[in-house]
Each structure stands twice: as structure tokens, then as C-alpha cells.
Image (cartoon, grey):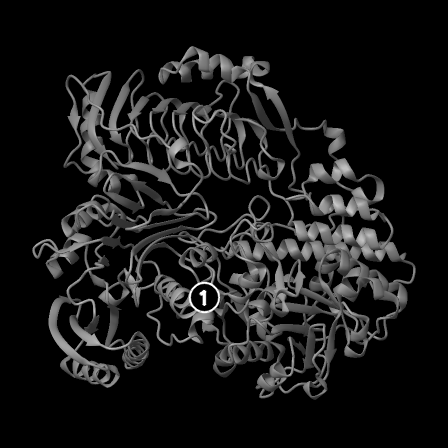
Amino acid sequence: MEPRVISGCGILGVLRKQDAAKIAASDAVSSIECIRYRGSRLGAGFAAYNLDGPQNHLHKVKVFVSSEEVLRHVKNVLKEFSDGGLWDAGFDAFSGKFMSWTALVDASEDSLRAAVDRLNYELMNAGLKGRVYSWGRYVEVFKGVGYPLDVSRLYGLVERSVEADLWIAHTRQPTNSPGIYPIWSHPFSSHEWAIAHNGDISSFGSNMEFTRFRGFRSFVGTDSELIAYLLDYLTNIKHMPLEKAAKALVNPFEEDIINNAADISVDEYVAGRGAWLDGPFSVVAGFCDGKDVYMLALADRSKFRPLVVGEDEERFYVASEEAEIRQLSENARVWTVKPGGVFLASMKKGIIVSGREHPEVFYRNVGKTTAVGEVVDAQGLGYSQLNLRIRSLFEKGLKEVVVVNVNGHRYLGFNMPPGTRLKIHGTAGNCLANFNKFGEIIVYGSAQDDVGDAMYGGRVIIHGDARDVVGQALQGGEIFVRGSVGNRAAIQMREFKDSRPYLVVGGRADDYLGEYMAGGVVMVLGVDSIGLDEPLVGRYMATGMVGGRIYVRGRVERWRIGLHPPKPDVIRYLRGLYLDGLIDEAVLNSFEGLRTVTIDDVRKILSGEPLRRITKLFTSKYHKELSITVKRLDEELPVVEQPLTRFFHEFNLEKTLYTKLLKEEFTVVSAQPLQPAEQQREHQPEEG
Amino acid sequence: MKPFGWTLGRVKHVQELAGTVGRQPGEPPIASMGSTGPPHVEDPLLIRDRLVCDGAQVTRPSIDPYREPVETHVYLCGGKIRLSMPVVVKIRASHPPYFSEAVVKAAYYMGVLADVSEAGLENFEKYRDGLLADVSYAGVGGCAGYVSSFYGLRRLSVPVFVKAPPAESYPWLKAAAENGMSGVLVDEELVGDTSLEVGVSVVDRELRFLGLRNEVSVLAGGWSVRGSDDIYKLVALGADAVVLSNAVEYAVGYPDAKARADVLRERMENLLLGLQRELKLLAGAAGVSSVFNSLVGNRELLRAVELDREIRLKLGVKQAGVG
């Protein structure tokens, strides 16, 4: 038995464009199998959507049954609720004590919905005797216990050359159920929705309380099934437009709702309270309304799970790892979904919501690169095998190792000896250059999550993008990324007396850039977007920062830096001051017009007693003042010149661009120097 | 003599948050991992002392509220009222003006509701959009009203709450909602036939069953609410906001005839700020970033320890270590 590797689940979605050929099951299997290490033997599955199936006038109802008796009962109930008839399509798989049985049912959506709810309720109460797990005209789910390849064989997906307009796939690391029966496998489906999910939502109990009195009585007990129910409820029962439902489900921040930046009103937010998702999730979902096929992806607002999307000439992709997309397409443009981001594409309409701002500018597709001379071919090697091969070459005294066809191989660039270089062609997998001290690692392509974690020397040069959590606890050496980086870059970065790390990003960065940062230098240049009026960072930049410096080109709006109290709380306090005659109406109004009220705003506008009183909403004993200035980069040459020169050299960027960049305005954020010890006395309460 | 459930440690803690004693007003102490409270370290005194909070773990990380957002706001009555945190403070008829004015002001500034239904609206009219007053004042406009029996409900321009004691069932909810009720206030200081915990959970469940939960708000509390842990648990059992009464008196050092009104107000503001921070820490520890959406009625985030099965079923809380 192979050792079980504890990892996160993996998800996949592949949607064809209208003029492209249907997608073969073998593509879905090969893509999800390339991240086999994310899953386990405990569950996998696929969902296929076909807009033009020959039997689309009938519902295809798929049921797990544990005995002849259960099957008889299922048939009887379905007959009772079907209007036109019921055709027994036989069994298509056997998995973990359950047979998968299929029927074609001529029934209205409403009566079938009632039949499914009754069946699942009765079968669950009778002690997990079976489950209706798929019941749409256009969707068909195939799921079971095993790795994705096992499940595909179970149903003969490749052998029968099953094709689809859209495939959803999942490989599972169970956390909320034992996973020993196929009813706990993904995708979970409800009418024409099928979803695969990686995460563990903290709103589970609230979502359950919301759903259970709204037409859904039976639950297998996982959060993932609830997401399918919620999507079904919001779009099919409440008739909420798909895009709006998706944007609400990611539970937008209140500040976005009241600033009309979330496409949902306070009233709608309140009316659906309990339906919105909290905690970690990345979700891929399919939907068909009989006219078009949709693929949806959702990322939670803290971005606690990986999610990338892509597009090439023929298809759209959603994946946990870029490697899944590269397995099928060398040329796809791939980009990171932002925290709280929604991606929505349809077969006929193309991309409806892109998952982030300006992916075409900020994300870099390096394309296929070639290497000359002696190379290690990673194709067909597992990541452990590849790492052993590379290590043995370095142990033989080689100073440079070139690896080609890298696709998601993890843990590359560990333990490299002094003076060595590793060149990677392809997509470097998670945890590249972790704990690196001596190695120079060059990636001709993009790198996935967690590059350079706790790296304390050496160099990493990435010609494409890096995904989430780059340079966590980086404490020496330098990381250069030509494209963009994702969420939580440079968190807990620190420096020592003789070791100052650098992270230089050519594109942009998402939320929490430099969270808890304690040292080192981060630069975000946006070299491809000079002249484009688009901020180069997300929000909550430099929260908890205690040292180091961050340079971001352009004037970063103050609300993006640090954490601020909710605007309605601040306005309420100001309103109190106004009612008590401590500030006048004009002052109150000037605050109302702000997007977010920051500590700089109150310090600028207020003074004396009102300022003293309201400051407590902004500070605490854990509050650390940040210094935020705007400077031309050439004013900071002593700090930035050397890394910047090396960055330009590595990526062969033009000298004129360098000169231009030095004249650009940068926002410089640093933690204020510690105050002298005698000023650090504990705060004395007013009334002694 | 403090009522049952209150200990000297509890009183000291709210006084420290308020800055009545100690040197760090509004700052929750962060000590270490592990519990210093009931049911295992201190004796469990109330039902909620036998409820423990399900924390985040590796697949569902905790959130550090000092660096990342944890939203404590709640909306009441379909969005008509916004609170900065799930808290209502109660003014009693016996409270002298210097005290009630300080508390009402602080509640207003800090964005929570003050229940002045026993004390009257006379001195507080300008804060009326932060007040819960007797329905006879509804003509003044702005404030939310309350009636003590739904038979007195009329359609009014302001949200109207019905005050009721904790009960095993609330058969009148549907009729009251049809008559314009926008919230229920489960007040344990009215004598009921069950505990506050059961009353809250039953109201929440019955409203959900009727499909009214997001239109009709639930406020609940009284003398026994001792701090943010109680607020957190009562919210998870189904309250949108929790009423503090004795906790306010103890925290600001009432009666303290020597304290100036603005000192009392400052203490009260500190108390609320401290409670809000504690709620963020508790929610963050459970991986919850939005109290309003993800905590209200989320019994899944609670587990019961050595709690009578019958009560546990009424609360809808699972037994610890079982499921």
C-alpha cells in the first residue's frame, strides 16, 4: 500500500468553447490525476454536462442503492412522482456496498424535486440505505470510493469514450466524513448543479439551519453538499441571477456591500443571512439552464484555499493547481482568482466574471521553453523521484541541473549545495525553494503556492507568476517574480544583521501583502501596467507589520493599508459627538463621504477631545503605527538600486524602463522606528 | 450579594475591561492556551457553562482579529437597525439619571441598542435611533418600540419587539408576525418556565420553521449574562443580540456616586469595546469572520459537556466528542 500523504483536496473544471470539440473523459481524468497526491483513496468523482444529450427531454436520475428492496422502493416512489413514465437504465457501477442505478424519468422539475427530497429523507432515516445523487436533464455525476482513475474505471468513462461540454472533477482528502461510501464523494449535485469543493466552511451550522427549512430535509453531513443545495435554492427556487447568487455566496465584506461594490444590497444580504459561506473554500460548480452551460468558481474572502483559472483557444479551466491546466494545455493563459473572487464562464458567452482585475495585464504565460544539453526529464516521475534524481546529480558534483517537463512537482529546490543552480522548465509545484540557503533556482514558467517558505539564502527567479503565500518567513536571499503574486506574499518576512531578504514582483500582489512583516524589502513594480489606473495591491496590506519596507508603485489608497474599524461604527461614534455638540455637522458630513474612515482621516480632521475619544476605535495595545509616504523611487536608491538592477538584468528588461521606473511615484510603507524606552510606558487610564 | 452564576472573577473581569479597575481598559487579556473557565476548571453554574466552543483546527484556520477582519455587526428587523456588535444594554427604572445617561450615551456612541423601556425616554430623545423604548413613545419616531404582549401590536412606522419570558414554546409567533412584530425580546427578568438558553433556542427554531427568521429578530438576555463568552454562546443558540443588565452595573462600578458622568460613560465605552474585541477573538478562534451570517444560530460551533440529554435536545447542541 502506498503511504497516505496528507494534503488538500483537488478540484477541476474544464468547459469547452462553443466552436471547440467536446471534451473527452480521458482529458478530465488525466488532469485530475496529475495532482493525485492532493487526494486519497477515500473518494473521487466527475460530473459531465451535455447540452445536446439525446435524452435531454427526460431527467436522468442516479441513485446509490444498497439492496434489491431499496431499489424497489426507489422505483415505486419515482413512479408515483413521474408524469410520463420511468425507464430503468440499469446499473453503471458498484462502489463500497452501493450499486449505482440509473433511471430516465419523465417528470416536471417540481415533482421530481419532491420525489428526490422524499427518497433521500427516507433512505437517510432508514440508516444510509441509499441516496439519489444526480437528477438533471443535462448533468450526470459519476462518483465513488477510490482515486479519480479508479472511479473513472468503475464507470468506464474512458473506455466508453464519454464526452462532455463541461467536466467537473474532484479528488478527496476527507475531513468531515469517513469517506468510506460513495455518497460522501464529490461532486455533490442538486438538480442541474454539481459542485466540487476544497475546504471546511465555518458557517456550516448556519448554512444548515438556513437550508433545512427551505425544502431540503436530508443531509449526508458535509459542508460541500450544502453548497450544492444553496446554489440550487438561490438560483432555481429564489430565481436569483446566477452571477448575483455567486457574488453573494462568497459573503462579501460589509464595507463592499454598503459601498455598492458587491452587487448585493443590504436588504438582500440580510434576507439571505445564513446562506453565505464563511471559512475556507474553493469551489468549482457546473450549471445548465437548457440554453447554455456554465462553469463557476468561488474563492473564500481570506483565500485559505488555492484556486486558479485559465483560458486557451478551445476551453476554460478551473483548478486547484496550475499543473492540472498545463496537463491539458501548454498555451493556456492562467491566472489566480483573488480573495473572495468569482469566476463565471459559459460555453456560449465566454467569460462573464473573470475572478480578478485585468488578468490579461498582470498574468504572464511563459509558454513552452526549450533547454539544450543534458537535462532531466520530469515527465512520468513523481515528485519524490524527481527530487532524488536532482539530489544525486548535485551530490555527484554537478553545479547546474536542468529539468524539463516539470508539472506541479513539489518541494523542488530543497537542500541545494553551495554554488549550485537548478533550472526548471514548466510549472514548479507547491513549496518551491522552501528552506533554501544556497541554491539559485530559475523557473521558466510559473510557480505554484508557497514559494521560498522560510528561505534564508540563495535566489529564486520566476519568469511567470507565483501563486499564494510567496516568501513566507523569508529571511535571506532574494525572490524575483516577473509576473504577479497572489495572496499573503511576504508574510512574516524578517531580516537579520547581515541578512536582508528581497522580494521583487514585476506585476501586482493580492491581499495581506507583508502581513506581520518584520524585516526585508518588498517591491511591487507593475512594469506592464504603467499608465493603467489599477492599484497594484489588494487590501489589508501591511497589517501587523513591525519592520522592513514595502514599495508599491503608485499612490496606494490608505484604506488598502492596514485594518480599519467598520465605517458604520466610526460614523456612529461621530454622530454621537455631533449630537453632544462636540463636532459640527459639516465635520460629520465630511466623514460620511469617505469610502473607509482611516486613522489618518480622523487625525487630519479632528483634534482635542473628539480625536482623543475616537482614537480608541482605531488603536489597541497591539496597534503599531505605520509610516506611509509617497516618494520617487530614485529618492530611495541606496535601498532599491541593487535588487532592482539585478531584477532588470535577470528578466532582460529595457534600460529605458528602468530609468522610467526610477522617476515613478512609489508608496513606501514601513513600521515606525521604536520609540525611546521612556516613552513606552503603559497607557494610564484617564481617571487614575 | 450577586445573583447565581456570577463569581468574583467574573465581576473583576468586566471591571477590568471597563477600566474601573486595572490599567488596560478595553483590552482583553491574552494569556495562553487552555481553559480557565467552566465546566472543567471552574464549576459549571449555568446551562451555558456546560457548552464549550468548537475551535478552529488545521483544515479551518483561526483568524487573528487584530490583523484580519472579523465582522461583529448584526442587522435587526430586516436591516432596519444595525448594531456594531450583538449587544443590547438595559436601563432599569431604579437607575439614577447620572448612571442611565452615561450608559445610554456610551451605547449610542458604540453602536449598540439601549433598552430604556423600563426607564422612559425623557432624557434621551436625541439618541432615539439607538433606543428600545415603550411603544407609547413610537409617535416620537426613530426608536424601536416594545410591547409586553402581542395583542397590543399595531402596525407602526418603527420596528416593534415583543417582550416575552423564556418559554418551552411560543405558539403566538406566527400571529404576532402577521400583526407587524419585527422582533422578540426574550427577557429572563420576566419569570418564565425555562432557562434563557432553552428560550432562545426555541424562539430561533420556531421562527426558522415559520420561514420568518431573517425578518423577525431575536434579542435575549438579562441578569445572568456575564461577558462575551455568554454573548457568543447565546448568539450561537439563536440570538441576534444579547441583553446585558447586571453586567453593566458591575462593570462600571455602580453605584458609585462619586464617579462623574463622563467617567462612567468612558468606562461603559471601554466595556463595549472590550466585549467587541473578545467576541472577535472568540469568533476568530472558531474560524468565523462574520458573526451575523455565520454565528447566529450556528449550534454546530457548540458542544455540550455533561449536559442533561433532554436540555441538550431542546438546545439542538451535539454532545462533545460524539458527532
Q: Residue at x 53, y 15 (%)?
A: A662
Viewer-nearest residue: A449 or A189: A189
Q: Residue at x 66, y 61 (%)?
A: B82
User: The disc labelled 1 sits on which kind of residue?
Assistant: Asn
Q: Residue at x 38, y 25 (%)?
A: A482
Viewer-nearest residue: A124 or A586: A586
Q: Is residue B21 visible?
A: no
**CA neighbours of label 1 inside 10 A, class few (<14), some (14 to 19), many (20+):** many
Q: Secondary structure at mark 1?
A: helix
Percent x, y for residue A78?
A: 22, 81
Furthest-right residue in view? Answer: B258
The residue that mark 1 highlights is A207
Question: Within the image, what quadrant is residue A639 found in?
Answer: top right
Q: Kindly identify which chain the residue marked by label 1 belongs to.
A: A
Percent x, y for residue A43?
A: 23, 59
Q: Is residue B251 left or right of residue A648?
A: right
Question: Within the image, what quadrant is residue A610 found in?
Answer: top right
The correct choice, above or below, for A126 with respect to B31 in the image is below
Viewer-nearest residue: A668 or B54: A668
Q: How many marks?
A: 1
The correct choice, above or below, for B263 with respect to A181 in the image is above
Q: Is residue A506 left or right of residue A374?
A: right
Percent x, y for residue A463?
A: 33, 25
Q: Is residue A544 visible?
A: yes
The correct choice, above or below, for B56 with respect to B187 in the image is above
Percent x, y for residue A250?
A: 46, 54
Q: Is residue A569 left or right of residue A333?
A: right
